[in-house]
Image (tube, rainbow, N blue to C red):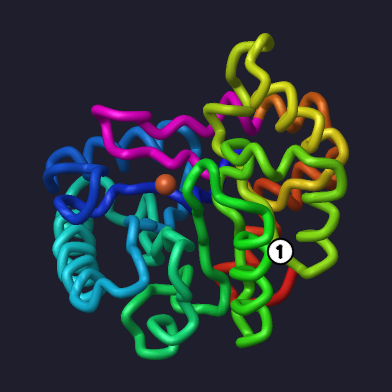
Amino acid sequence: MDGFYDIHCHLIPGVDDGSESIEESLAALRQECEEGVRSVICTPHIAPGETDAADRQRKQFDLLKKALSSSDLCGKIELHIGNEIYGEAPAVQPLKDGLIHTLAAGHYVLVEFALAESFRHIEETFRSLLNNGYLPVAAHIERYECLREPDALAKLEELGVYFQVNTATVTGRLLSRETRWVRGLLREERIHFLGTDSHGTHYRPPRMREAAAWVEKHCGAEYAEKLLHKNPECVLRDEII
Ligand SMILES: [Fe+2]
């Protein structure tokens, strides 16, 4: 079952700690294609308060799209822009001002936090985004200690927050605490999105196929279809899951 979506990666060249050049971005997008991915939302890091980052990212994104269209990958993979928002400071006003990209220009926003962030701050950040009409997706939830507390995820679920995990965590070592936790959540059908969180060919190259195969083997067919296809399609169409 190909035709996957990658809603979290750092493949716009020269704008964050991801891909460093157009050549690296095209090589990573070729890998995405080989992994069965047909649609990618590029989500460079951004922190609320950065006033010119979104513009710069858009310009580099346009250059990448142009390079893609004159390469052999033309027509094989489609690109969209978004951001991975560092949720330390309030993001609502910069989002309203167009200083931060939502996912594929819709209402979904991808948000990460400091590893030791408190649950209280995470909850408040999501509440504020939801109250202002955004649809927040928590990036790589396996990283945050506070989300392992009893009922932490349930509270966010109740608010309406969506959860993304990294493909590399799904296929990680069985002894990895993160991998075991994430696989348990997938079996409970509580994850909404997979993302590669690829930073180019040099750091975490994009891998999708093996994680997708794990889901197809260990979770129900209906949930696999949602996770791998229907949910990311909702993001691109700007429809509520
Ligand atoms: Fe990321």
Could you tell me how many numbered marks the image carries? 1
Residue 17 in the magenta stretch? The answer is no
Task: Characterize the magenta stretch by its predominant secondary structure.
Answer: loop
Residue picked out by circle 1: 161
Q: Nearer the viewer, residue 37 or 88?
A: 88
Q: Residue at x 43, y 82 (%)?
A: 95
Residue 86: where, in percent of width, then height? 42, 59
- In the image: residue 83, left or right of residue 69: right
Q: Residue at x 40, y 66 (%)?
A: 82
Residue 117 to residue 161: above or below: above
Residue 216: where, in percent of width, then height? 75, 31
* Quarter of the picture holding the C terminus: bottom right
Residue 140 to residue 174: above or below: below
Residue 82 to residue 93: above or below: above
Tell me if mark 1 has few (under 14), some (14-19) or many (20+) residues whose alpha carbon lies within 10 angstroms of its own.
many
Q: Nearer the viewer, residue 120 or 131?
A: 120
Q: At numbered mark 1, what does the secondary structure look like: helix, strand or loop?
A: loop
CB of mark 1 near ligand 1 (< 8 Å): no
Q: Residue at x 79, y 41 (%)?
A: 149
Q: Residue at x 58, y 18 (%)?
A: 172
Amino acid type, label 1: Val
* Quarter of the picture holding the N terminus: top right
Q: Which residues are magenta?
A: 194-212
Q: Nearer the viewer, residue 238 or 113?
A: 113
- In the image: residue 203, left or right of residue 139: left
- In the image: residue 144, left or right of residue 19: right
